[in-house]
Image (tube, rainbow, N blue to C red):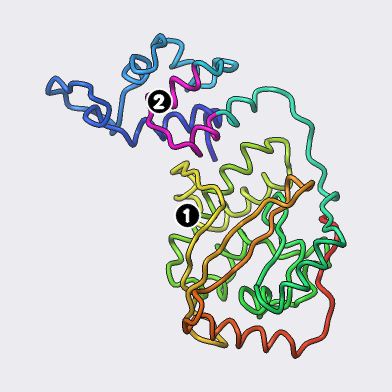
Amino acid sequence: MDRTSPLGAFLKARRARLSPDDVGLPRYGDRRRVPGLRREEVALLAGVSAGYYTRLEQGRQANASPEVLDALARALHLSPAERDHLYDLSSTTGHRPAVSGDDEKVSADLRTLLTTMAAHVPALVVGRRNDVLAWNRTGHALLAPHLDFAAPDDPGGRPNLSRLVFLDAPTRALHRDWPAKARAVVGNLRILIARNPGDTHLAALIAELTARSAEFRSMWDAHTVAPCGRDVHTLAHPAVGELTVTQQTFDVPKEPHQSLVTFTAEPGSPSTAALEALKARGRTVDAPVACASTP
């Protein structure tokens, strides 16, 4: 875990990936002891004093104004997602209410939607910590057929997508490009913890992954930011073989911490045929969609 403040650690990681050539600064033939920009160079580019920037990076500056954050984002060539993350980290110095661990519920309308979608689209609903709150039969058959379909009904044993990717062997084997999937998971967790610094359950999840996975520790230290949205995955499914799916993540209306995740394939492709086979397998079992409150 970070020894400095989350904001300072992120700033340090981002300046380390840039060279003077990247930002148009002269090198003067110097030999650098560490990669990336120096603190005073970032301060120069952002138009702030070197002392101020040093205090900010070392966690000795309480916060930064929006104008300073914008200047730092430009100086460090941050992407839009990284800029938003910078703002989230800066606001963590304020007092946010602790997040309850027992208030995540899936609405009846959303459960109905999941059931209806099962005939066409694998789908699941995830909560603020990447817990599976509900999934339809096809989504379960695609991602985790080795788990009990009713697992999301158990508040103490809900599948967690982040934990599955790093600690579950069948899930790891499912993803042809596991490192890319793992980096995406870590990048999303970086965003979640910045937005919910008072969530002790989320902090415990990150501590668990840090303790149990050297690969997670290495990726976590990179401070990569990767919001969920659209991605393409090639899966090696134990029942239907290899298929390529497009994963899309949508915010659930009126439930700001919940997301609907869907999986589709190119029409007429072998991957579509594989999904159809999974749908047929799902229809052979008649059971309600899993849904319950979170622990």
Name the residue at 62% across, 73% down.
Answer: 143
**In the image: residue 56, left or right of residue 37:** right
Q: Which residue is mark 2?
A: 74
In the image, residue 273 sits, relative to residue 66, either above or below, namely below
2 or 1: tag closer to the N-terminus: 2
Task: Using the rendered view, name the quadrant where residue 76 is placed.
Answer: top left
In the image, residue 280 sits, relative to residue 94, either above or below, namely below
Q: Which residues are magenta?
A: 68-86
Instruction: Report the magenta stretch's main SS.
Output: helix
Identify residue type, mark 1: Arg
Q: x and y percent of residue 139 in the render?
A: 67, 73
In the image, residue 198 sits, relative to residue 205, either above or below, namely above
Q: Are marks 2 and 1 in contact (CB under 8 Å)?
A: no
Identify residue type, mark 2: Arg
Q: Is 260 one of the magenta-colored residues?
A: no
Task: Using the rendered view, name the quadrant where residue 34 is placed.
Answer: top left
Q: x and y percent of residue 246 in the render?
A: 52, 66
Q: Quadrant of the N terminus?
A: top right
Q: x and y percent of residue 183 in the render?
A: 47, 54
Counting every numbered tag in the picture gives 2
Q: Is 71 one of the magenta-colored residues?
A: yes
Name the residue at 53% across, 81% down.
Answer: 272
Of residues 235 and 16, the one nearer the viewer is 235
